[in-house]
Image (tube, rainbow, N blue to C red):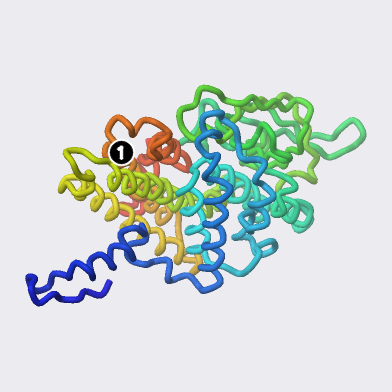
Amino acid sequence: MTLTLDPQSTAGTPSDDAAAAGAAATVLDADFYGFMRRLTPVEQASVAEIRDYLEREVRPGADDRWEATTSPRHLIPGFAELGLFGSGIPEVAHFENSAVYRGWVALEIARVDPSTATFIGVHSGLAMNAIAVGGSPEQKAEWLEPMARGELIGAFGLTEPLHGSDTAKGLETTATRRTGAEGTDEWVLNGAKRWIGNATFADVVVIWARDTADDQVKGFLVRQPATGFTATKIERKQSLRAVENADIVLEDVIVPEADRLQEIHGFRDVAIVLRLTRADVAWQAIGVAVGAYEAALAYTKTRVQFGKPIASFQLVQQKLADSLADITASIALCVRVSEMLDEDAQKDHHSAMAKAFATKKMREVVARSRELMGGNGIQLDHGAARFFADAEAVYTFEGTYDMNTLIVGRAITGIAAFV
């Protein structure tokens, strides 16, 4: 923002006109420092197109879907046409792009509807990346293109009823290799999974199971429907209600060796997939914060108390400024961690720090935004309540705040303090 000095004002203070112009250019845009300008013109144009689509097609029904606990499956063709599926996978991406661009897209989607961002993240970020990272050339050829077109939807089955943070060592779902009745090379899966997004309607569920022979975690493409596979929608959620999470039970589910992810040899390979998505979840957290902040800003400019808009009150402006500072700091951190991914320099502790910091600041922003609306803040109609509730799930998945700080702590000290 260029400051124009008013001769009648204190030196260094912008004139009213300049201040108003600057406010229009920056304060109404949560990208206060203009980080989006670091994207290429093609990437910026794509983000603008995606933003327009989200405003036209996703925002109008977001509250209703959240209340009804239904996923936006009718929008899948539009998501695919925009290139939202597999944008980080060269074989299917609509154009060559950066990790910063992909992060910005995650922000834009979550800014409108965190549930939609999570649905896309599960299908594209987790299921498709699991195949891109761990699949054979034949598996990639079979699955990635149809999934990018939205013709087939994926889910990612890692978390279990009794194992979340300790999944690396505690995974109980088993895979036993055997020769089938007709001489086929196959695996038998047994166990349970919990909180698996998309699983009630997915065409393929990536199931992670421990090999009973070598005790290593392996990945399996479980085509749907599958005998012995049951997915039951989890009800009574109060966060990300439009994400259809499921409890999965696997009872002697048979998977041919050809559907085992051939390049997954242990949990270290699973961690590669999680690293690719963890930074995007940090960007998603920023989007949740931005959505709540924008709603609060609009509300405070129209809500009149004591004869004037509450946006004119000093304490209200302080809360808005604090929120924008938290959003800006989070964007700066995520821009750099995404650049590191493109540079092949990003490690687990880098994405863990971004996820921990961005989700912590998100929580603070959504709380302030709800607070600025008073009692109205708990009602969906005013724009903050959904983000306030959804923030809790985003804060927790892809590694809790505590676990991510411990990953960073291990990098700092060289000492693992997980147990």
Residue drawn at 67 percent across, 42 percent down: 74
Residue drawn at 43 percent across, 71 percent down: 38
Residue position for label 1? 367
Q: Is residue 9 above or below residue 234?
A: below
Residue closest to the eye, 60 or 30: 60
Q: Is residue 59 above or below residue 99?
A: above
Instruction: Let me know if residue 110 appears in the view.
Output: yes
Numbered disc total: 1
Give how far across and how far down residue 17 sits, in percent: 23, 69
Locate residue 101 relative to residue 256 in the image: left or right.
Answer: left
Locate residue 74 relative to residue 397 in the image: left or right.
Answer: right
Instruction: Let me know if residue 364 appears in the view.
Output: no
Residue closest to the eye, 70 or 198: 70
Residue closest to the eye, 226 or 200: 200
Locate residue 6 relative to residue 179 in the image: left or right.
Answer: left
Give how far across and how far down residue 133 sits, in percent: 64, 55
Give how far across and how far down residue 167 sits, in percent: 52, 36
Q: Residue furthest front?
A: 307
Give how far across and how far down residue 32 sits, in percent: 32, 62
Residue type, mark 1 in image: Ala
Quadrant of image for the N terminus? bottom left
Quadrant of image for the C terminus? top left
Locate residue 385 relative to residue 97 in the image: left or right.
Answer: left
